[in-house]
C-alpha cells in the first residue's frame, strides 16, 4: 500500500442526494443559528453572535448525525463543559499558550468521563482562552451567550432538518428487542457474532471508535442476512410458500373459521375479500384475545363482554371481521427468503402472506416453511419463476392496513 493510499481515509461512498442533503443541512443550521442569535441578542453586543466551533458541529450534525459524537448530550454537554473549563483556566493561568493547552486537556478528560465527547468543543475551549478581550471581559457569561445559545439553536435545527429529510435524530442505537418482552436476545442474534462479542473486542482494543457497538451489531446482522441471500442463490418466497390455502372472508362465521383452524392444524387463516385481495388474518391468538370460544370450540361470551361488544359494534362478536387482525405484514413472491428471518424469528410473525402487486393472495410462508428453507443446502439450480431481471426485482416487505 502506497503512502498516498494510507493517508486517504476509507470513507463509505455516499450518493449525490446524501451529499446535497448534508450540505443543505449545514447551510440551514448555520444560517438560522446566526439569524436567531442576532434577533434575540441584538447586533450591538461585544461578544460574537456565532462562534467558529459551530461550523465543526454542523459537519457532525448534518453529515454524520448517527455518530455518537453528534448526539444532543455530546453537543450541549461538551460545549458547555469546554467553555467553563476554558474561562476558568484563563482566569488562573495568565500564560495564554499554557492556559489553552491545559483547557484542551482538561476538557477532553471531563467530556470522556461524562460521556459527552464532542470534537468541536475543543475549539470552544480554545476560543474561551484565546478569543480576545471581549470574551475575557464576559467571563462566565460566555457559557450562556454565545456558546449556550448557539448550541441550542443549531441542535434544534438539526432535530427538525434531519428528521424531515429521513435521518432519525437523535440516533437510536438500540438493537431489536425480543418480541416476547424477555431479557433474551432475539433468536437471530443468539448465534454467530453477538453484541456481547462486539463490545468485548472493542474493550480489548481500548480505542475510541466513532460508531456505537449497537450500530456495529446491526450492520453485522444485516451483512449476515445479505450473505445468506447470496449463498441461497435465487430462493424466493415463491419457491417455498404454501399455495393450497384455506381462507375465510370477513363475513365468515367464527364457528366455521375455528373448525378450519382445528381441522387443518393451522394457527392462522388469511382473510380475503370477494376479489381475493388480502384484508387481514385471523389466528388462534385472536380467538384467545377476544375470549370468544370455550375450550370445546363453542362460542362463549360472558355478560360483560357481550355487553361491551353490543355497545361497541351494536352486535356481539360473531364474524371473522369482528376479531381479525387487519394490520398484516406481507411479502411479494420474489422476496428473498432471507428477508423473512428478522420478522419471523425476531418479531414473532408466524405467517407471512404472499401477495401480488394488486394485493391478491398467492400463498403463505409459515415459520415451518422458512425453517425447512434455511436447512436446505444452497444450490445454484433454482431458476426464477418469472423471466425478470434479478437485479430489478422488488425485494421489499410490505404492510397491509
Image: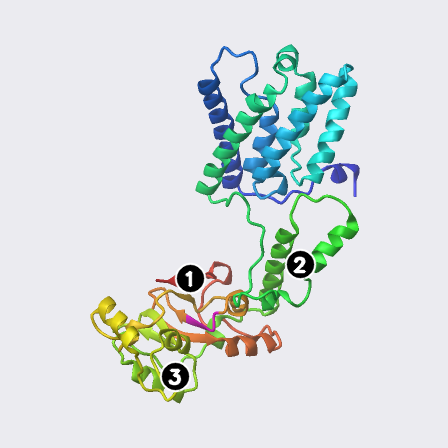
Measure the C-alpha gap from mark 1 to mark 2: 28 Å
**In the rendered image of this protein, does residue 38 appear above or below residue 166?**
above
Q: Which residues are magenta?
A: 349-353
Considering every residue shown, the one lying at the far left of the view is: 314
Report x, y in % for residue 93: 77, 18
Measure the C-alpha gap from mark 1 to mark 3: 25 Å
Q: Is residue 351 magenta?
A: yes
Asked if marks 1 and 2 touch (Cβ < 8 Å), the reply is: no
Front-lying residue, 399 or 259? 259
Residue 224 as seen in the image, left or right of residue 334: right
Identify the residue under disc 3: 261
Report x, y in % for residue 308: 27, 70
Identify the residue under disc 2: 195
Front-lying residue, 163 or 385? 163
* Image quadrant containing the N terminus: top right
Q: Earlier in the sequence, mark 1 or mark 3?
A: 3
Identify the residue under disc 1: 398
Front-lying residue, 105 or 81? 81
Amino acid at each position: 500500500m502506497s503512502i498516498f493510499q494510507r493517508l486517504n481515509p476509507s470513507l463509505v461512498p455516499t450518493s449525490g442526494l446524501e451529499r446535497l442533503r448534508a450540505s443543505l443541512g449545514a447551510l440551514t443550521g448555520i444560517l438560522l443559528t446566526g439569524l436567531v442569535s442576532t434577533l434575540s441578542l441584538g447586533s450591538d453586543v461585544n461578544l460574537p453572535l456565532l462562534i467558529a466551533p459551530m461550523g465543526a458541529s454542523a459537519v457532525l450534525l448534518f453529515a454524520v448525525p448517527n455518530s455518537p459524537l453528534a448526539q444532543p448530550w455530546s453537543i450541549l454537554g461538551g460545549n458547555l463543559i469546554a467553555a467553563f473549563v476554558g474561562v476558568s483556566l484563563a482566569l488562573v493561568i495568565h500564560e495564554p499558550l499554557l492556559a489553552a493547552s491545559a483547557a484542551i486537556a482538561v476538557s477532553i478528560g471531563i467530556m470522556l468521563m461524562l460521556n459527552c465527547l464532542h470534537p468541536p468543543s475543543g475549539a470552544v475551549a480554545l476560543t474561551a482562552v484565546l478569543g480576545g478581550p471581549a470574551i475575557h471581559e464576559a467571563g462566565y457569561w460566555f457559557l450562556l451567550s454565545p456558546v449556550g445559545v448557539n448550541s441550542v439553536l443549531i441542535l434544534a435545527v438539526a432535530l427538525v432538518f434531519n428528521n424531515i429529510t429521513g435521518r432519525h435524530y437523535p440516533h437510536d442505537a438500540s438493537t431489536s428487542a425480543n418480541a416476547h418482552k424477555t431479557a433474551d436476545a432475539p433468536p437471530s442474534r443468539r448465534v454467530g457474532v453477538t453484541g456481547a462479542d462486539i463490545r468485548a473486542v472493542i474493550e480489548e482494543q481500548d480505542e475510541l471508535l466513532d460508531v456505537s457497538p449497537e450500530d456495529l451489531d446491526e450492520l453485522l446482522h444485516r451483512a449476515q442476512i445479505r450473505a445468506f441471500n447470496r449463498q441461497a442463490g435465487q430462493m424466493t418466497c415463491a419457491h417455498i410458500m404454501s399455495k393450497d390455502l384455506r381462507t375465510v372472508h370477513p363475513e365468515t362465521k367464527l364457528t366455521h373459521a375455528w373448525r378450519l383452524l382445528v381441522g387443518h392444524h393451522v394457527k392462522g387463516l388469511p382473510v380475503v375479500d370477494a376479489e381475493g385481495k388480502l384484508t387481514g388474518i385471523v389466528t388462534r391468538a385472536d380467538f384467545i384475545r377476544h375470549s370468544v370460544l370455550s375450550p370445546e370450540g363453542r362460542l362463549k361470551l360472558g355478560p360483560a363482554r357481550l355487553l361491551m361488544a353490543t355497545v361497541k359494534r351494536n352486535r356481539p362478536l360473531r364474524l371473522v371481521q369482528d376479531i381479525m387482525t387487519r394490520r398484516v405484514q406481507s411479502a411479494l413472491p420474489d422476496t428473498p427468503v432471507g428477508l423473512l428471518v428478522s420478522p419471523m424469528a425476531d418479531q414473532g410473525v408466524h405467517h407471512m402472506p404472499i401477495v401480488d402487486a394488486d394485493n391478491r393472495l398467492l400463498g403463505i410462508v409459515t415459520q415451518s416453511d422458512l425453517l425447512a428453507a434455511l436447512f436446505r443446502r444452497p444450490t445454484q439450480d433454482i431458476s426464477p419463476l418469472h423471466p425478470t431481471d434479478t437485479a430489478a426485482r422488488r425485494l421489499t416487505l410490505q404492510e397491509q392496513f
